[in-house]
């Protein structure tokens, strides 16, 4: 292929991608979301729970990736900062990239304008519901301690590594002879409030009644502090 013909081919491909990524994206948003969820584990090459710009670019330049999928990847690449900012994972420290929660929040918040351009607008109503603490304990001074304990020990309590703390896993930790009484009181609080906490954030990809996720903990205690 000559230089001129190659350039025309690349321009044609770029124009096709733009038509999918920019002006015509309104009809493709659900397809992009389904693709991102379905391909997430393969895109997340290092398995750290975040899809980075480099990982998206790697998938985009893969010769086995079809042009339809490339247009979806280009959408994610061009908006990676906006999507990554859709949800703030307090436990993620300096991790950068797109998490599953970012995807869910971004596509839930996204607005498509008449000209086909789109943006994500935060939903203020998401913070209006206030969970009610229970369990018969005066928790006014200990919410932060419980929150920090739960996040710090999450991986240890999550014995099957599925990303959710079940009632049985909390019970196992609470009855462990190595667990101190202060920590036991925190675990009892989590057990007694497991239903309320697990409803604090709805993971659309997770099975029903999975248990408490890190996002559930973050949202539940964030609302308690309002």
Image (cartoon, rainbow, N blue to C red):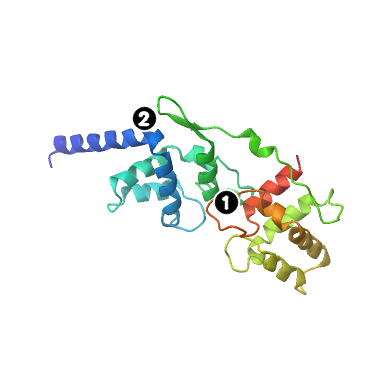
Name the residue at 41% across, 34% down: 26
When the figure is inspected, residue 124 is found, relative to residue 59, above or below; the finding is above
Residue 65 screen position, x and y as percent: 30, 51
Relative to residue 82, is residue 142 depicted above or below?
below
- Residue for badge 1: 203
Q: Which residue is mark 2?
A: 23
Q: Is residue 181 left or right of residue 62?
A: right
Say above or below: 208 vs 123: below
Residue found farthest to the top: 115
Name the side, left or right, on which 69 lies relative to 210: left
Give the camera-side residue of 59 and 204.
204
Q: Quadrant of the N terminus?
A: top left
Residue at image x 58%, y 34%?
A: 122
Estimate the x, y position of residue 17 in percent, counting from the top left.
31, 37
Mark on residue 222?
none
Pick the front one: 196 or 75: 196
Q: Is residue 18 above or below residue 68?
A: above
Helix, strand or loop under label 1? loop
């Amino acid at each position: 292929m000559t230089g001129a013909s190659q350039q025309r081919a690349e321009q044609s491909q770029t124009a096709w991608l733009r038509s999918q990524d920019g002006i015509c994206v309104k009809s493709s948003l659900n397809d992009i979301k389904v693709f991102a969820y379905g391909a997430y584990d393969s895109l997340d090459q290092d398995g750290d729970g975040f899809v980075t710009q480099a990982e998206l670019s790697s998938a985009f330049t893969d010769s086995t990736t079809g042009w339809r999928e490339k247009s979806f990847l280009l959408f994610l690449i061009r908006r990676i900062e906006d999507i990554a900012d859709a949800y703030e994972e307090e436990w993620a420290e300096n991790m950068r990239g797109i998490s599953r929660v970012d995807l869910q929040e971004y596509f839930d918040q996204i607005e498509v304008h008449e000209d086909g351009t789109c943006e994500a607008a935060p939903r203020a109503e998401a913070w209006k519901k206030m969970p009610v603490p229970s369990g018969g304990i005066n928790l006014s001074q200990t919410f932060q301690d419980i929150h920090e304990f739960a996040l710090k020990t999450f991986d240890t309590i999550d014995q099957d590594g599925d990303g959710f703390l079940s009632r049985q896993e909390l019970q196992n930790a609470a009855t462990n002879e190595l667990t101190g009484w202060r920590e036991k009181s925190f675990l009892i609080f989590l057990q007694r409030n497991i239903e309320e906490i697990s409803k604090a954030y709805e993971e659309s990809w997770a099975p029903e009644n999975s248990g408490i996720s890190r996002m559930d903990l973050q949202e539940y205690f964030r609302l308690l502090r309002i």
